[in-house]
Image (spheres, rainbow, N blue to C red):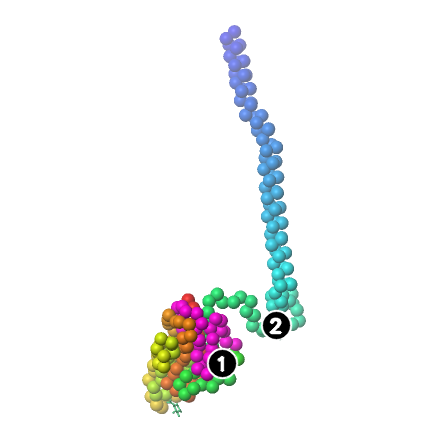
Amino acid sequence: MVKHENPNVYVVDSRANRPPVLPRLGQRPRRAGAAQTLLFLLVSVALCGMTIEACFIYRLYFLEPAASASSSRITGGDDVTSTTKRPSYDVLPSKPVAHLTGGNDVVHGQQILAWSMIAEPILHEMGYSDSDRSLIIQKEGYYYVYSKVFFLEKGTFYHSVEMNTGMYPGKSMILQRSRKYSSRKSKGRSNSYLGGVFHLYKDDALFVKVSNTSKIQQHKSFENYFGAYMI
Ligand SMILES: *[C@@H]1O[C@H](CO)[C@@H](O)[C@H](O)[C@H]1NC(C)=O
């Protein structure tokens, strides 16, 4: 009897093992639910992406004429000249910046270089005074100031960036200078580059001075330049 009962017990045990199977069967709808949620999420993400894309396309075609001109270039529009056009300033600099170059319109002083207002200068939150041939600071701060000139090596030459400031009226301050000594018979040409950081105040007037502007070589506007930007 005991031997008969034991197999029964084992049978009961094996049945007791089954219940874990039943919940597994019951999990099916739960898995389907998770899959549905995932599908819903994926579709939502796709729809969001399409909506954002639609917004970008709308902006490109109806709100930014410059940008739509460039897109016509991509689609093979016959407007070939637009490819050579400089990008328009849709994005303004976040800080004051200036970059001036030489040009056919400039008239230098004896020692102070003038900068072109037709050779597409960059002037943002900074001014240029034609009469003083100076960059005028409009916002106080730290600026990186630089200048490069291309010059005739003959005798003594110097290149400096100087400043007229309200703190020392009537006197110009030298911010940076380079020098070059060559023989008087030299026919060589050389470049001088200056760059450095300075604390500048509103209405400070920066200008580039050389020992004699007759030594400045100006074949192309990008050979001589002067600029500053707030850091
Ligand atoms: C600059 O050079 C020119 C020609 O070489 C000369 O006549 C003039 O006196 C010079 N100016 C200065 C300020 O040295």
Q: Which residue is mark 1?
A: 116
Q: Which residue is mark 2?
A: 82
Q: Where, by quadrant of the figure, is residue 33 drawn?
A: top right
Tell which residue pokes out farthest to the top in this image: 1
Is 1 displayed left or right of 66 in the figure? left
Which secondary structure lies at badge 2? helix
Q: Residue at x 63, y 56 (%)?
A: 54
Q: Is residue 99 shown above or below 30? A: below
Q: Residue at x 58, y 73 (%)?
A: 85
Q: Residue flagged by tag 2: what amino acid is it?
A: Ser
Question: Considering the image in quadrants, where does the C terminus appear?
Answer: bottom left
Mark nearest the camera among 1 and 2 is: 1
Q: Residues within 10 Å of mark 1 (few under 14, many from 20)?
A: many
Whichever of labels 1 and 2 marks the residue nearer the N terminus, that label is 2
Which secondary structure lies at badge 1? loop
Q: Residue at x 46, y 83 (%)?
A: 131
Work out whether residue 103 can be spotted.
yes
Highlighted magenta segment, given as a residue range: 120-146
Magenta stretch holds residue 126: yes
Where residue 86 appears, as percent x and y from the top left, is 56, 72
The residues tagged by marks 1 and 2 sit, at their Cα atoms, a distance apart of: 25 Å
Q: Nearer the viewer, residue 184 or 145?
A: 145
Where residue 191 appears, as percent x and y from the top left, is 40, 80
Within the displayed image, which quadrant is ligand 1 positioned in?
Answer: bottom left
Where residue 59 appears, as percent x and y from the top left, is 62, 61
Q: Nearer the viewer, residue 94 or 81?
A: 94
Q: Residue at x 34, y 86 (%)?
A: 156
Q: Residue flagged by tag 1: what amino acid is it?
A: Ser
